[in-house]
Image: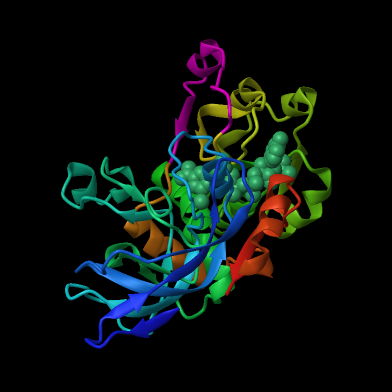
Amino acid sequence: MMNRDLKGIHQMTIRCYAAKKPNASLEPFEYDPKPLLRHEVEVKISHCGICHSDIHLIDNDWGISDYPLVPGHEIVGTVTALGPEVEGLTQGQRVGIGWQRSACLNCECCLRGFENLCSQLKDTCVGNHGGFADAIRIDHRFAFPLPDELDSADAAPLLCGGVTVYSALASYGVRPAMKVGVIGIGGLGHLALQFASKMGCEVTAFSSTPDKEAEARGLGAHHFVFDDDSQILERVASTQDFILSTVTADLNWASYVDALRPGGKLCFVGVPKEAISVPAFSLIVGRNSICGSPIGSRTDMREMLDFAARNGIKPCTENIPMSNVNEGIDRLRSNQVRYRVVLSN
Ligand code: NAP
Ligand code: ZN
């Protein structure tokens, strides 16, 4: 909702959906944003994906949530106002916004191009209201122009899910000759299958849902492993160079370490509830490692968008109006989504 006061300065009330307390359903909510800072843009939101991290935030799983909490960090929209020091973006331009809304841009990590590792990193919907809204104000250096080839609803899930899996594959040096496993075929996992397969890897989907097999193969998986049974995992022992876990569940991680070839890595992007426990010997004998990866840098974001546009990487989306946000959240909580809910205004 926007209007102009007599001096021509934007006055606006942002309409959005908020959780008022942990585990709550979202309710309509309004807030008046702080004045637009010199580096900020205002973006009118057309689409926003629902990532499982939004559910972790709603439920305060990580102890960092403030209420009322407006989730949403896979945002697509158009620039409607620019602070005086914004460069490289124009009024009306289509942009995407992900999990990160700012960084210090001065520390060693930022100067090396790893803004996603900055200790001053600010999250789009922590201490700030996110993208389940009609607008947002954000540091323009974390608003990314979108390639024309990408439809807005398809671009949304790339802005957190896409960049997270792309960055993990790229930063741990995954190469075309490698065998890559993806655990959990959800929002992140179904994109990871596509990125790894378009990178040229031999891809295995590990899933607790057998009827995802045909779709997983259609998304680029060469093999499908129903991972509900550790005996089944024994059959893939010593086969994988890089396994990316996107699940929120506590699985038998020792079996996945055993599935690694010598020198292999089990990389966590999904956040299980419990601590990860594996026998040290299973890491020692094959010189294997366990690692993690947070979102992606600004360079990763640009590369990922370009790679997705050029290679026809396209999320499978369930598109619903933003007013039905609770329906989308319920479907995601019960693992029914195939494979990302995208809200539209
Ligand atoms: P999602 O769409 O819910 O997908 C998770 C998948 O995990 C499910 O589709 C399911 O796949 C599998 N799964 C296995 N056991 C499950 C169980 N007991 N309950 C529910 N699902 C189970 O979630 P997402 O949006 O992809 O996010 C996945 C995780 O990544 C979340 O923890 C999220 O916070 C995290 N994340 C991390 C980063 C980062 O920067 N590291 C960025 C974004 C998200 P199958 O049916 O195939 O088993
Ligand atoms: Zn996310």
Quarter of the image where the N terminus is located: bottom left
Q: Where is residue 271 in the image (x, y as percent from the top left)?
A: 54, 35
- In this orientation, which residue lies closer to the viewer: 36 or 317? 36
Occupied quadrant, residue 13: bottom left
Does 234 sit above or below residue 63?
Answer: above
Residue that lies at the very extreme toward the front in this rendered image = 6
Q: Does the magenta stretch include residue 240?
A: no
Quarter of the image where the C terminus is located: bottom right
- In this orientation, which residue lies closer to the viewer: 233 or 277? 277
Q: Where is residue 67 in the image (x, y as percent from the top left)?
A: 47, 46
Does 149 sit above or below residue 320?
Answer: below
Residue at image location 64% in from the left, 28% down from the top = 250
Does 118 sit above or below residue 278?
Answer: below
Q: How many marks?
A: 0
Residue at image location 37% in from the left, 78% down from the top = 79
Q: Where is residue 123 in the image (x, y as percent from the top left)?
A: 38, 50
Question: Whereabouts is ligand 1, in terms of quadrant?
Answer: top right
Q: Is residue 292 magenta?
A: yes
**What segment carries the magenta color?**
272-293
Residue at image location 51% in from the left, 18% down from the top = 283
Would residue 175 be visible to someone looking at this image?
A: no
Does 76 sit above or below residue 180?
Answer: below
Would residue 56 be visible to someone looking at this image?
A: yes
- Using residue 148 as the reference point, say whether residue 110 is left or right of it: left
Residue at image location 45% in from the left, 35% down from the top = 292
- Using residue 326 as the reference point, say whether residue 14 is left or right of it: left
- The colouring scheme, among rainbow, by chain, secondary structure or one colour, is rainbow
Q: Position of residue 126 (x, y in %)?
A: 41, 48
